Amino acid sequence: MQDIEIVDFQPEGYKPLVDYESWRVAVLKYCEDLKIENVTTMQKHLYTDEVFVLLQGNVTLFLAGDGEKPENVRAVKMQPHKIYNIKKGFWHEHIMDEAGEVLIVENRNTCDDNSPLYNLDEDLIQQLYASVGLNTNEENGNALTDNFNLTGSNSYAGDLQM
């Protein structure tokens, strides 16, 4: 038996790195799905909290309550060296810039079967954009992202104070 396991991160997307008994450590890196204009769903985990730690870049978490469907979307811009624990049963999603990288800790058995997705309707998408100070373009449905700066000092109304 070895005394240490060293695992490299992948170039993009989600990848579990270490599974042990009931827990998992994973990394999520930037991929096209994590651009705000590509967010069309929110997810909740029925049996586990999910912990996020910002490793680098700029990441925003979206939270939307613990009801049957997401509502009242709010944004939390992550800060390095802070732990963000999304409680089980709460709707969430995230966006990140190309430098974004997040460490994730969750139950090992977290999967699609116990983590329902909700397809966002137009109202929820507008709430998502509004929570970070953006509007949607009514003519073609594309995001007006010229004034959105993930790397700046944007302060969202929903930021957590820790």
Image: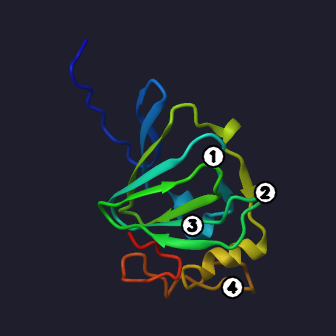
Can you give x and y, in whole percent of width and height, for residue 148 in the image?
A: 48, 83
Mark 3: which amino acid? Phe
Which quarter of the figure is the C terminus placed in? bottom left
From what the image shows, is residue 73 above or below residue 69?
A: below
Task: Choose mark 4 or mark 3, whichever is in front.
Answer: 3
Q: Does label 4 or label 2 sit earlier along the sequence?
A: 2
Residue picked out by circle 4? 137
The residue nearer to you, when weighing 133 against 12, is 133
Residue picked out by circle 1? 45
Neighbour class for label 1 at 10 Å: few (<14), some, many (≥20)?
Answer: many
Q: Is residue 125 left or right of residue 77?
A: right
Distance between mark 1 and mark 4 Cα atoms: 32 Å
Q: Does label 4 or label 3 sit earlier along the sequence?
A: 3
Residue picked out by circle 3? 62
Q: Secondary structure at mark 2?
A: loop
Distance between mark 4 and mark 2 Cα atoms: 28 Å
